[in-house]
Image: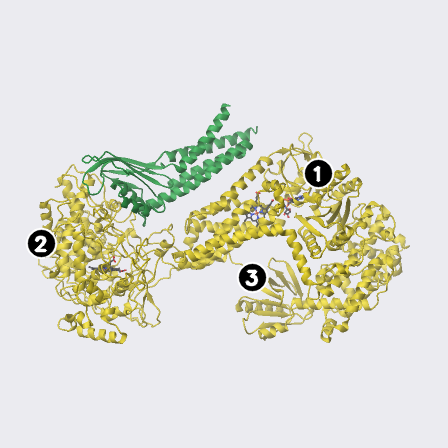
C-alpha cells in the first residue's frame, strides 16, 4: 500500500545504525558480555582446568530418547528455532589458517573407542575470528566472527548480500518480484512453484559430506536459499521452502495490486513484508513458547539507536544451543485430516530399523537426513511409486502434531554422537563440540556467567537444579546427580569449573531453558529488536503505516501456512508450536528405536565404531608413486674402496662368460674379475650392525666389497651372486661374520694398491742390487736411471721390511689385468698377451715376484743382446729358435697394430727388405737370433736403453711419497731422454729440426729444488692455485654467496617469518626447502643467460675489465650455474614430494585456506594427481622437470661428444623452459610470482646479444676455395667480410647455405689476421662435417654456381689470443685442436719476420696427436712456419701418443724402423715431416721443468692448450704440479673441442 | 619518405595499442541508466547512469546521477576501483567510507568467491593471463622492429608472433571464465557485459600483425630482395 519511495533494509546490515553503521553487520565480531577466560588472556582456549568435553557429554547428557516435552512443545517449535538461529547467527566457519582444537576421546569410549586403542580424537576447528586487531593482546582478546547479520532482516530468505538475493530472484517482468522456483527451471514434476529453484548456478551453499553415504555430493542438488546452511536437514529446509512460498505469495499479491510497479519494487515490497512477518512471529509467537511464558520479551518501546544488536558469545556457544535438547530423533510426516478425522502417517523409504521388529512408526530419521534434506521433499513430486504430495505441508503437519523431545539434560543420539562431521570423522558428538566451542570462544565458567547476568552463583551441583535432581518430576534425576557428584569428587570438579553449556543445560526445567539461558536468550532477542532501525514496529523508518503494523501483529504462523499450502483450520491447530491441540496427535512419542539406525551403525557387530573415517591421501597413492618413481635415482650398490678412499657407487654386472664386471655409475668398466682362475670364492656377509655389507673375496686380487642401503637389497644381491657362481661352476662359500671381523678380513682395493706399490718398489730395489753397471758420460740417461736405483737401493732393502711385509710381497702375484695396467695397455692387446706368456714362465696365469724380477733385471742390466733376445723370443711363436721373414713382419705389424698405425704393405715390404739386407740376411727366409741382433745393427744401442715403462697408475700417490718420488724421478729420467742419437754424438746441433733438443737438455736432478716438506708443498700449491685463479675464486665465491643468500632469504622467510602460516604448519620445512630452492632456481636459470651473451663477453674481454673478470671461463661458469640450477631443481622436486604428500592428506577445505588462489567445488577432493597434473603450477612443474631432464641429459659431456645434434636441439628448449617457468609461477599458489625480478635483466641482455649475433650471422659469404686434404680434413677459404677484425686464435661459427642456414658450428680460423681471406680447417667427425665435405668437393664443383655460400658468426674470442703477452709461450695442440695454433703460428712468424716488437721471446709448439695421420694436412703449415722462422722464435715438437715412450721395448722397434725409413726415404715413416717425432705422450711436467732451467729469467710461462679434455687436463695438472714448487709460475689457458 | 613515416607510425601505433590494452579499463563494459536507491537513511531514488569498466587488473565502477532532488546533494565520491587480490578488504573499506549503494552492490559481485560464483576471481584470472600476454607482446614488438631493420624474415616471424600473442591474450581473456555469466540487476534494469574497445582493438591489431606478417613473409620468400 505504500506509494511513496521507501528506504528498504539493506542485506548486509550496513547503515542500520546512523552513528555506528557497522553494528550488526554480516562478518563482524560477536559481542562479548561475559569476561573472556582465555588461558593466556588473549587467545588460548579456556577450560584447560575443566574435565574432558566428551566425558562431560557422557556424564551429563546421555540418555534414551522417546520422552516427550513436558509442555507438548511441538517439533515444529524446535526446528523453527533452528532457523531463527540461522537468521541471526552463523559462527561455524573455521578460520584460516586452520587451528585444530580436537576433542580427546577417553580411552574405551563405547562409541568412539570400543576397541580401547586410545588416542583418538574428534576433529574440531577453531572458529574464524577477527584477525586484523583481536587476539593479539590481553586487552582485546580473540573475537570470533558472525558471518551473517544479527538483525532479523531476512538473511534466512534472501542471503546477506544483494548479489546472493539477485541470484535467487526470477527477475522477470511477467511474474514480478518473485523468487525463482524449480518450476521456473523446468524441473519435471515440480509444479505450481512449490519449491525453490535448484542451486544449478552454484551458489556457495554449505556442503559437508552427508554422513549417511559418506561421500561428497554436488551442491547443485540443494534448493537455493538465502540461508547457506538451510539444507542441513529436511525439517530446517521445510522452513526454507516455507519462506520461499510466502515471499512469492506476497509478491503475487503486491504485483496484482500494483500493475505499474517494476519487478524490483515488487520484490522489495514483498521482502519487506516477509521480514516483518518473520520478525513478528519470532519475537511474539515463537520466543514465548520456546523460552516459557514468563520470559515474554518486554514491550516494544521504540527503536533505540544506543542498543547494540550484536549476538553474544554466550548466546552462540551455549544458551541458544539449548534447542539441541528438544531435537527429536526423527520427524513425522502426515497427510491432512481425512474426512473420517484420521490422517495417514507416511513411512520413510529407507531401511527398516532392526529395533522396531515390524512396528512402523516411522518418521524421517534426523541423523540420516543431514545434508540429504532435499530427498523427502523431492519424494513428493519425483518418486514414482508414491502419489504426488506436498512435502513441505506434510512436514509442517507432522511436526505440528509431534511432541518434541523433552526439555531435560538428555540429548538425542542424533546430535550427541551422530551429528555430521567431516569425511575423516563422519559422526561427531555435538555436545562435546558445544563444550569445546565455548572454550574455543574463551567462555568463562558457569558461575561467572551467572553473576554477570545478575544471578546468584550455585555452590553445589544439586543447587543448579533441585527440580531436576529430586526425582519427583524427572525419574532419572537422582541417579544423574549421584553420577555427577561421584565424578565431581573423584575429579575435583565443582560448579566453578563447570562449562556454561553443561551446567546451563542442567538448569533446564519443564518450563524451558533455565535461569541463565533464559536470561541470555531473552536479552539477545530484545536487543536484536530494539537495536534494529528497520524493525517493523518502528514507525519512524517509513516502512509501514500504523495500520500495516497492526495488520502484521495479527498475522500468525498458521495464517501463513494456510495461505501457502492447502492446509486448512481443520488440519492443524492454530498454534503449531504446541502440539496439544493437534487435530491428529502423534501416534507415539518417537524414539531412536522406532527408526532405522544412524549409518554406519549396525546392531550385531561386536565392535562398532559408529562412524566412518577417511584418509585424504586415498586415491593419491598411485599417482604419487608413479610420479616420483620417474625421478628416482637408482644406486645399485656402493663399493668400499678403502678407509681413506671411501666408497663409490658401482654397478656390478654378472657375466657374460666367466667373469664379473664392475662398472661405475656411468657404465664405465672399472674392473673385471676373471673367474677362470678361481675354483672357489668366499663370500663374506656382515651379520650384525647394519647387515648391509657383503664382500666377494678374490684370492690374489682384491675383494669386491659392496655396501647396500638395505639388508633386503644386500640379500637379494647375495642370492644373485651365488646363483651366478653356481651357473659358471665356481664353488662358493658363504661366511657370515661380525662387522668388525669383516672389515679386518677384507682386502680392499687400497690395500691391494699398497701391496703392489711395495711389490714394485722391492722389485726395483732388487733389480738395482742385481747389478747396474756404472756407465760412462755419453749414456747420460741410463746413468741416471742407474743412479736412481742405486739410491733407491741404499735406502730400501728388502731387509728393511718386516718379515710379514716381505712375505706378502714375495707371495704377491700380478694378474694379467694388473700387468697390463702396469704397462698402461689394454689387457687384450697382442703385446701384453705375448709379454705375459713370456714372463709367466710357470703358466699359472699370474706373474709372481721371481718371474717379474727376472724380466726387470734384463731391462735393468741394459744388455742389448739380452733385450733383443727377449724380443726375439716373444715373436718366435713356434719356438724353433728361428724367426721367419713372415714372423718378422708379424712382429713389426703387431707393433704397429698395437698403436693403430697403418703402414702400407709396400712400405712395410720395403722396410723389411732394407732391414734384412742390412743385417745381411737378404736372401734367407729365416734368421737366427744373431741375425736379428745384426739387423738391429747400430740401433742396438737404443735397445739397450729400452725399459719397460710402467704406467703411472700402478703407483698412486700413497703414504710413501718419499719412495714414490724416487720412482717418479727414475721414470722421468727415462722419459726425458728425448735426445736423438746424433745429438748425443754432439753433431749437427744447428740443424733446424734439432733445435728441439736444445731447450730440453737433460740436466742433473735438482733435488734441492723440491721442498720435501709436504705441508710446504701443499701450501705452495695452494698459494699458486690461488694466485692463478684468484679471479675465478672471487667470482665463484661471490656467485655462491649470492646464491646462498637468495636461498636463505626465502628459506628464512618461510621457516621463521611464516612459521605460523598454514602451509608452513602442514608441510613443515618442506615449504622452506621448496621456496628457497625455487628462488635459487630462478636466480640460476636467469643468470645463466648472462654467461651466454657471447658478443658482450667477446667485446668486454678486450676492455680493461678482463683484468677483473675471467671472461674465458664463461662456459665453465655456465656449467657451474647449470649445476646449481639442477641442484635446486632436484631439491625443489624432493621438497614437493614431501609437500604434496602433506597436502594430499589435508581436507579439501583446509587447502583453500593454504592456497588462496586454489579453489574447488565443495564436492571435489583434489588428489595428488590433481595438484600435479591439473593445476597450472603442477602441470607446468611436471613439464619443467621433463624439459630440464632432457636438457641436462643431453648436456652431459657424453651426449655432447656423441650426439651433439641432440644436445643443440634439446638445448634450444631453453625458451620453453623460461615460458614454462613463468607460467609455473603465475599459478600464484604460494606466493606472488616474482621470477621476472631475476629474469628481466639477464633476458634483456641476452636478447640484445642474440640480436647482434643475428644481425651478424646472416651475412652470406662466398667461398673462394675448398680443398680436400688428407685425413678427412676440408679446407675452406672464403672472402673476408668487410670490417671483419679478428685475432689469431679466435673462432667463428659458420653455417652453410647448402646444409641449412640455422645450424651453426664453431671452427677456429686458421688464417692469420694479416691474410686477405679467411680459412678454416674442418675435420669430418660427424654428420654435419661429413656433409660439408661432400658439398665442398672441388671435384664436383659446378663451374656456374661456385660453392654454396657460408654464413659466418663471429669472431669469438678465446684465451689463446694472449700468447704474445708472455715471454715464453707454450702452445699445446691436441688433435684438431691445433687449428688455433695454425693461425697463431702463422701470425707469430709474420710478426717476427716484420720485426714487430712484442713481449714474446720464445714459443714452444707441442703438437700432440693420436695417430700420425692427422699430421698430413698440417704439414705444410708447420713447414712453412719452420722455413719462415728466421729468428728462431718457434720450436716445434710432435708427439704421437699411440706410440709409447721411446725407450719402451715396443716402441724401440718402431723407432728403429722409423730411423731406417728416414734414412732410406729421407723423411719420417710416420709423419713425413722434417721435425723429430716423439713417441708417446709428452710428459708436461718434466718438460716444463726443463723449460724453467732453460729460461731461468722468466717468471711466468703462458701455457695454452687446446684439444681433447684429457690432454688439457694433464697439461693443467702439470702446471699445477709446477706451481707447487718454488720457481716460475705456469699460467694455463685451455679450450676443449 | 612516406613509406618510412608510415612504418614509424605503424610501429608506434602497435606499441600504443599494446600498452593501451594493457592498462586500458575497457575490456568489458556495461552501462545502464536506471532509477535506483542511492544511499541509506534516505528514501528517495535517483536516476543514474551506472557504468562498469573491467580492465585486466581492475574494475572501475562509476555512478553519474542527477542530484538528489529534495536536498540537492551531489554525489562526491562516485567511483570505485576494485578487483585486486584484496577485493574483500577494499570492499570493506568502501563500506566504511559509505559509498553509494549502487557502487557497493556492484562491487559486492566481485567479492563473492564460493563454489561456482566467483566473478571477481574469474575476471582477475583471465585478466592476469591476458596482461601477461600483453607484457609479452610488448618486448616482442620491440624485437620485431629491431629485426625488421636487420632481417626482414625474422621481422615477419616476430610480427606474427607478436600478433599471435596478442590474440592469445584475447582468447585467454575471453576463455578463462567459469561460473555463470555476470549479470547484475540494478534498479529496474539488468547490467549485461560486453567486450569493450580495448578488447576489440587488441584483437584487430593482433589480427593485422599476423596477417601483415604473413604477407611480408610470403613476399620475402617469393622475392628475396
Ligand atoms: C671453439 C671451437 C673451435 C673449433 N674449431 C675447430 C676447427 O678449427 N676445426 C675443426 O675441425 N673442428 C673444430 N671444432 C670442432 C667442431 O665444431 C666440431 O667438430 C663440429 O661441429 C662437428 O660437427 P658434426 O655435426 O659434424 O659432428 P658431431 O658428430 O655432431 O659432433 C662431433 C663432436 O664435435 C662437437 N661438436 C659438434 N657440433 C658442435 C658445435 N656446434 N659446437 C661445438 N662443438 C660441436 C661435439 O662435441 C662432438 O663431440 C671446434 C669447436 C669449438 C667449440
Ligand atoms: C537437527 C537439528 C540440529 C542439528 C543437526 C544441529 C547441529 C548443529 C551443529 C553441527 C552446530 C555447529 C557446532 C559448532 O561447530 O559449534 C550447531 C550450532 C548451533 N546450534 Fe544446532 N543443530 C540442530 C538444531 C538446533 C536447534 C533446534 C537450535 C536452537 C533452537 C540450535 C541452536 C544452535 C546454535 C545457537 C548453534 C551455534 C550456531 C553458530 O555458532 O553459528 N540447533 N548446531
Ligand atoms: C649441465 C648443464 C649444461 C651444460 C653442460 C651446458 C652447456 C652449454 C654449452 C656447451 C653451450 C654452447 C656454448 C657455445 O656454443 O658457445 C650452451 C649454450 C647455452 N645454454 Fe647451456 N648448458 C647447460 C645447461 C643450461 C641450462 C639449464 C640453461 C638454461 C635454461 C642453458 C642455457 C643455454 C643457453 C641460452 C645457451 C646459448 C644457446 C644459443 O646460443 O643459442 N644451459 N650450454
User: In the rendered structure, which disc, 2 or 3, sits on the residue that comes first in sequence?
Assistant: 2
Q: Is residue A685 above or below residue B107?
A: below
Residue at image mark 3: A635
Residue at the limit of the structure toward the top, as seen here = B1
**Res A569 quadrant in image:** bottom left
Q: Where does the image place residue A498, in percent across and percent down from the top left?
A: 24, 68
- Label 2, label 1: how far apart the Cα atoms are: 115 Å
Residue at image mark 1: A1311
Q: Nearer the viewer, mark 2 or mark 1?
A: 1
- Label 3, label 1: how far apart the Cα atoms are: 50 Å
Q: Nearer the viewer, mark 3 or mark 1?
A: 1
User: In the rendered structure, which disc, 3 or 1, sits on the residue that comes first in sequence?
Assistant: 3
Residue at image mark 2: A569
Which secondary structure lies at badge 3? Answer: loop
| Chain depicted in yellow | A
Chain letter for the residue marked with disc 2 in the picture? A
Chain letter for the residue marked with disc 1 in the picture? A
What shade has chain B been given?
green
Query: Marks 2 and 1: same chain?
Result: yes
Amino acid at each position: 500500500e505504500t506509494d511513496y519511495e521507501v528506504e528498504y533494509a539493506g542485506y548486509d546490515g550496513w547503515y542500520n545504525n546512523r552513528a555506528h553503521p557497522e553494528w550488526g553487520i554480516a562478518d563482524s565480531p560477536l559481542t562479548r558480555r561475559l569476561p573472556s577466560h582465555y588461558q593466556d588472556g588473549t587467545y588460548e582456549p579456556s577450560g584447560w582446568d575443566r574435565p574432558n568435553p566428551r566425558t562431560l557429554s557422557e556424564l551429563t547428557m546421555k540418555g534414551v530418547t522417546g520422552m516427550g516435552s513436558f509442555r507438548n512443545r511441538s517439533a515444529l517449535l524446535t526446528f523453527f528455532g533452528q532457523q531463527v538461529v540461522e537468521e541471526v547467527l552463523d559462527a561455524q566457519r573455521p578460520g584460516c589458517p586452520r587451528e585444530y582444537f580436537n576433542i580427546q576421546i577417553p580411552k574405551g569410549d563405547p562409541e568412539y573407542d570400543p576397541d580401547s586403542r586410545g588416542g583418538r580424537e574428534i576433529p574440531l576447528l577453531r572458529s574464524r575470528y577477527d584477525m586484523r586487531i583481536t587476539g593479539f593482546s590481553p586487552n582485546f582478546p580473540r573475537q570470533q566472527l558472525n558471518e551473517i547479520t544479527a538483525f532479523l532482516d531476512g538473511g534466512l530468505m534472501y542471503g546477506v548480500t544483494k548479489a546472493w538475493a539477485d541470484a535467487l530472484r526470477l527477475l522477470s517482468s511477467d511474474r514480478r518480484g518473485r523468487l525463482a522456483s524449480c518450476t521456473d527451471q523446468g524441473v519435471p514434476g515440480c509444479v505450481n512453484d512449490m519449491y525453490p529453484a535448484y542451486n544449478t548456478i552454484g551458489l556457495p551453499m554449505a556442503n559437508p559430506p552427508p554422513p549417511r553415504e559418506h561421500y561428497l555430493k554436488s551442491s547443485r542438488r540443494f534448493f537455493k536459499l538465502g540461508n547457506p546452511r538451510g539444507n542441513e536437514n529436511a525439517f530446517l529446509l521445510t522452513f526454507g521452502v516455507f519462506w520461499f512460498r510466502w515471499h512469492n505469495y506476497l509478491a503475487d499479491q503486491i504485483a496484482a495490486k500494483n500493475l505499474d510497479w517494476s519487478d524490483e519494487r515488487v520484490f522489495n515490497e514483498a521482502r519487506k513484508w516477509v521480514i516483518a512477518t518473520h520478525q513478528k512471529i519470532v519475537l511474539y509467537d515463537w520466543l514465548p513458547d520456546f523460552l516459557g511464558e514468563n520470559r515474554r520479551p518486554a514491550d516494544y518501546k521504540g527503536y533505540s539507536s544506543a542498543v547494540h544488536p550484536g549476538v553474544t558469545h554466550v548466546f552462540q556457544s551455549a544458551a541458544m544451543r539449548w534447542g539441541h535438547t528438544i531435537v527429536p530423533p526423527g520427524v513425522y510426516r502426515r497427510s491432512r485430516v481425512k474426512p473420517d478425522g484420521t490422517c495417514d502417517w507416511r513411512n520413510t523409504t529407507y531401511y527398516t530399523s532392526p529395533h522396531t521388529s515390524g512396528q512402523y512408526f516411522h518418521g524421517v530419521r534426523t541423523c540420516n537426513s543431514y545434508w540429504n534434506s532435499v530427498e523427502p521433499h523431492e519424494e513428493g513430486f519425483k518418486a514414482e511409486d508414491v502419489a504426488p504430495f506436498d512435502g513441505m505441508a506434510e512436514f509442517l503437519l507432522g511436526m505440528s502434531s509431534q511432541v518434541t523431545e523433552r526439555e531435560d539434560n538428555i540429548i538425542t543420539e542424533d546430535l550427541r554422537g551422530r551429528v555430521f562431521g567431516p569425511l575423516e570423522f563422519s559422526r561427531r558428538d555435538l555436545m562435546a563440540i558445544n563444550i569445546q566451542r565455548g572454550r574455543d570462544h574463551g567462555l568463562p565458567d558457569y558461575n561467572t556467567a551467572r553473576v554477570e547476568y545478575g544471578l546468584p552463583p550455585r555452590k553445589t551441583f544439586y543447587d543448579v537444579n533441585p527440580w531436576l535432581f529430586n526425582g519427583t518430576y524427572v525419574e532419572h534425576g537422582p541417579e544423574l546427580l549421584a553420577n555427577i557428584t561421584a565424578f565431581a569428587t573423584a575429579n575435583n570438579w565443582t560448579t566453578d569449573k563447570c562449562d556454561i553449556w553443561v551446567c546451563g543445560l542442567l538448569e533446564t526445567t519443564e518450563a524451558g531453558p533455565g535461569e541463565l539461558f533464559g536470561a541470555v536468550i531473552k536479552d539477545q532477542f530484545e536487543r536484536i529488536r530494539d537495536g534494529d532501525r528497520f524493525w517493523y514496529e518502528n514507525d519512524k523508518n517509513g516502512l509501514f503505516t500504523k495500520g500495516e503494523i497492526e495488520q502484521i501483529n495479527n498475522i500468525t504462523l498458521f495464517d501463513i501456512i494456510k495461505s501457502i499450502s492447502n492446509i486448512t483450520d481443520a488440519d492443524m491447530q492454530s498454534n503449531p508450536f504446541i502440539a496439544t491441540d493437534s487435530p491428529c496427535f502423534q501416534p507415539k512419542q518417537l524414539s531412536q528405536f522406532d527408526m532405522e539406525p544412524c549409518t554406519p551403525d549396525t546392531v550385531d557387530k561386536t565392535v562398532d565404531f559408529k562412524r566412518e573415517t577417511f584418509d585424504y591421501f586415498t586415491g593419491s597413492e598411485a599417482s604419487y608413486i608413479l610420479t616420483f618413481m620417474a625421478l628416482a635415482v637408482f644406486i645399485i650398490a656402493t663399493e668400499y674402496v678403502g678407509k681413506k678412499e671411501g666408497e663409490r657407487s658401482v654397478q656390478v654386472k654378472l657375466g657374460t662368460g666367466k667373469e664379473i664386471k664392475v662398472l661405475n655409475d656411468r657404465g664405465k668398466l672399472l674392473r673385471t674379475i676373471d673367474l677362470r682362475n678361481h675354483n672357489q670364492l668366499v663370500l663374506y656377509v656382515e651379520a650384525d650392525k647394519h647387515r648391509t655389507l657383503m664382500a666377494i673375496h678374490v684370492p690374489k686380487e682384491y675383494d669386491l666389497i659392496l655396501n647396500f642401503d638395505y639388508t633386503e637389497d644386500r640379500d637379494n644381491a647375495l642370492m644373485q651372486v651365488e646363483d651366478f657362481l653356481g651357473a659358471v661352476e665356481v664353488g662358493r662359500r658363504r661366511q657370515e661374520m661380525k662387522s668388525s671381523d669383516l672389515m679386518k678380513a677384507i682386502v680392499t682395493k687400497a690395500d691391494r694398491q699398497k701391496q703392489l706399490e711395495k711389490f714394485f718398489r722391492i722389485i726395483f730395489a732388487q733389480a738395482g742390487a742385481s747389478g747396474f753397471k756404472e756407465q760412462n758420460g755419453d749414456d747420460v740417461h741410463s746413468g741416471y736411471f742407474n743412479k736412481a736405483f742405486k739410491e733407491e737401493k741404499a735406502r730400501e732393502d728388502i731387509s728393511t721390511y718386516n718379515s710379514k711385509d716381505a712375505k706378502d710381497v714375495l707371495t704377491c702375484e700380478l694378474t694379467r689385468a694388473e700387468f697390463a695396467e702396469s704397462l698402461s695397455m689394454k689387457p687384450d692387446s697382442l703385446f701384453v698377451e705375448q709379454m705375459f706368456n713370456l714372463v709367466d714362465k710357470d703358466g699359472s696365469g699370474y706373474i709372481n715376484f721371481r718371474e717379474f724380477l727376472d724380466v726387470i733385471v734384463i731391462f735393468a742390466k741394459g744388455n742389448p743382446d739380452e733385450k733383443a733376445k727377449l724380443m726375439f723370443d716373444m715373436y718366435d711363436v713356434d719356438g724353433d729358435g728361428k724367426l721367419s721373414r713372415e714372423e718378422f713382419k708379424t712382429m713389426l705389424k703387431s707393433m704397429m697394430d698395437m698403436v693403430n698405425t697403418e703402414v702400407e704393405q709396400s712400405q712395410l715390404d720395403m722396410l723389411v727388405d732394407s732391414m734384412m739386407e742390412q743385417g745381411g740376411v737378404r736372401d734367407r727366409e729365416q734368421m737366427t737370433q744373431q741375425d736379428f741382433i745384426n739387423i738391429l745393427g747400430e740401433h742396438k744401442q737404443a735397445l739397450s736403453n729400452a725399459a719397460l715403462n710402467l704406467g703411472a697408475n700402478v703407483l698412486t700417490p700413497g703414504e710413501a711419497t718419499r719412495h714414490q718420488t724416487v720412482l717418479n724421478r727414475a721414470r722421468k729420467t727415462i722419459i726425458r731422454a728425448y735426445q736423438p742419437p746424433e745429438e748425443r754424438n754432439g753433431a749437427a746441433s744447428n740443424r733446424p729440426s734439432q733445435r728441439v733438443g736444445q731447450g730440453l737438455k737433460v740436466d742433473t736432478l735438482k733435488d734441492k729444488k723440491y721442498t720435501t716438506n709436504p705441508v710446504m708443498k701443499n701450501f705452495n700449491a695452494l698459494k699458486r692455485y690461488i694466485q692463478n685463479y684468484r679471479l675465478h675464486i672471487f667470482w665463484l665465491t661471490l656467485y655462491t654467496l649470492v646464491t646462498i643468500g637468495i636461498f636463505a632469504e626465502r628459506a628464512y622467510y618461510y621457516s621463521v617469518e611464516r612459521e605460523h602460516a598454514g602451509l608452513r604448519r602442514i608441510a613443515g620445512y618442506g615449504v622452506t626447502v621448496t621456496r628457497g630452492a625455487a628462488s635459487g632456481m630462478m636466480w640460476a636459470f636467469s643468470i645463466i643467460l648472462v654467461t651466454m651473451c657471447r658478443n658482450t663477453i667477446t667485446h668486454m674481454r678486450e676492455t680493461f675489465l678482463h683484468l677483473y673478470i675471467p671472461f674465458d671461463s664463461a662456459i665453465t661458469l655456465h656449467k657451474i650455474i647449470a649445476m646449481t640450477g639442477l641442484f635446486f631443481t632436484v631439491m625443489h622436486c624432493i621438497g614437493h614430494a614431501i609437500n604434496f604428500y602433506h597436502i594430499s592428506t589435508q581436507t579439501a577445505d583446509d587447502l583453500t585456506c593454504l592456497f588462496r588462489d586454489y579453489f574447488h567445488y565443495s564436492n571435489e577432493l583434489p588428489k595428488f594427481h590433481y595438484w600435479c597434473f591439473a593445476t597450472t603450477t603442477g602441470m607446468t612443474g611436471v613439464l619443467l622437470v621433463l624439459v630440464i631432464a632432457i636438457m641436462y641429459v643431453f648436456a652431459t659431456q657424453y651426449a655432447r661428444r656423441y650426439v651433439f645434434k641432440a644436445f643443440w636441439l634439446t638445448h634450444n628448449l631453453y625458451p620453453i623452459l623460461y615460458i614454462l617457468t613463468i607460467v609455473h609461477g603465475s599459478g600464484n599458489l604460494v606466493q606472488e610470482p616474482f621470477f621476472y625480478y631475476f629474469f628481466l635483466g639477464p633476458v634483456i641482455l641476452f636478447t640484445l646479444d642474440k640480436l647482434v649475433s643475428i644481425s651478424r650471422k646472416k651475412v652470406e659469404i662466398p667461398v673462394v676455395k675448398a680443398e680436400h686434404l688428407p685425413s678427412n680434413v676440408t679446407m675452406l677459404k672464403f672472402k673476408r667480410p668487410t670490417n671483419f677484425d679478428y685475432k689469431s686464435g679466435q673462432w667463428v661459427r659458420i653455417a652453410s647455405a647448402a646444409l641449412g642456414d640455422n645450424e651453426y658450428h664453431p671452427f677456429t680460423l686458421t688464417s692469420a689476421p694479416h691474410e686477405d681471406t679467411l680459412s678454416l680447417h674442418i675435420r669430418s667427425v660427424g654428420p654435419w662435417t661429413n656433409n660439408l665435405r661432400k658439398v665442398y668437393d672441388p671435384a664436383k664443383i659446378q663451374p656456374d654456381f661456385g660453392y654454396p655460400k657460408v654464413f659466418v658468426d663471429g669472431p669469438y674470442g678465446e684465451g689463446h689470443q694472449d700468447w704474445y703477452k708472455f715471454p715464453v709461450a707454450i702452445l699445446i695442440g691436441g688433435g684438431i685442436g691445433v687449428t688455433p695454433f695454425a693461425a697463431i703460428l702463422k701470425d707469430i712468424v709474420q710478426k717476427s719476420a716484420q720485426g714487430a716488437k712484442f713481449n714474446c721471446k720464445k714459443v714452444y709448439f707441442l703438437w700432440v696427436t693420436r695417430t700420425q695421420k692427422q699430421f698430413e694436412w698440417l704439414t705444410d703449415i708447420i713447414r712453412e712456419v719452420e722455413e719462415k722462422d728466421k729468428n728462431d722464435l718457434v720450436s716445434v715438437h710432435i708427439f704421437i701418443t699411440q706410440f709409447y715412450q721411446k725407450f719402451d721395448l715396443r716402441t724401440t722397434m718402431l723407432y728403429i724402423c722409423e730411423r731406417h725409413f728416414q734414412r732410406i726415404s729421407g723423411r719420417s715413416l710416420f709423419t713425413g715431416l722434417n721435425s723429430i717425432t716423439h713417441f708417446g705422450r709428452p710428459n708436461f711436467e718434466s718438460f716444463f721443468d726443463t723449460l724453467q732451467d732453460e729460461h731461468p729469467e722468466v717468471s711466468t710461462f703462458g701455457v695454452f692448450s687446446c684439444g681433447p679434455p684429457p690432454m688439457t687436463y694433464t697439461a693443467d695438472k702439470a702446471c699445477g704440479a709446477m706451481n707447487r714448487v718454488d720457481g716460475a709460475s705456469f699460467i694455463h689457458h685451455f679450450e676443449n673441442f | 619518405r612516406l613509406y618510412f613515416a608510415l612504418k614509424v607510425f605503424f610501429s608506434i601505433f602497435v606499441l600504443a595499442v599494446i600498452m593501451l590494452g594493457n592498462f586500458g579499463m575497457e575490456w568489458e563494459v556495461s552501462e545502464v541508466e536506471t532509477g535506483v536507491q542511492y544511499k541509506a537513511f534516505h528514501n528517495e531514488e535517483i536516476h543514474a547512469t551506472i557504468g562498469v569498466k573491467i580492465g585486466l587488473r581492475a574494475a572501475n565502477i562509476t555512478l553519474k546521477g542527477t542530484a538528489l532532488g529534495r536536498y540537492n546533494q551531489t554525489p562526491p565520491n562516485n567511483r570505485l576501483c576494485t578487483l585486486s587480490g584484496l577485493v574483500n578488504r577494499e570492499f570493506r573499506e568502501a563500506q566504511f567510507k559509505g559509498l553509494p549503494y549502487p557502487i557497493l552492490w556492484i562491487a559486492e559481485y566481485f567479492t563473492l568467491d564460493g563454489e561456482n560464483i566467483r566473478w571477481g576471481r574469474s575476471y582477475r584470472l583471465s585478466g592476469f593471463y591476458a596482461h601477461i600476454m600483453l607484457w609479452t607482446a610488448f618486448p616482442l614488438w620491440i624485437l620485431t622492429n629491431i629485426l625488421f631493420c636487420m632481417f626482414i624474415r625474422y621481422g615477419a616471424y616476430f610480427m606474427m608472433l607478436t600478433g599471435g600473442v596478442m590474440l592469445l591474450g584475447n582468447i585467454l581473456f575471453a576463455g578463462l571464465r567459469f561460473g555463470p555469466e555476470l549479470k547484475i540487476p540494478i534498479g529496474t534494469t539488468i547490467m549485461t557485459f560486453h567486450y569493450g574497445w580495448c578488447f576489440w582493438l587488441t584483437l584487430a591489431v593482433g589480427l593485422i600483425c599476423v596477417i601483415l606478417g604473413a604477407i611480408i613473409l610470403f613476399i620475402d620468400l617469393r622475392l628475396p630482395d
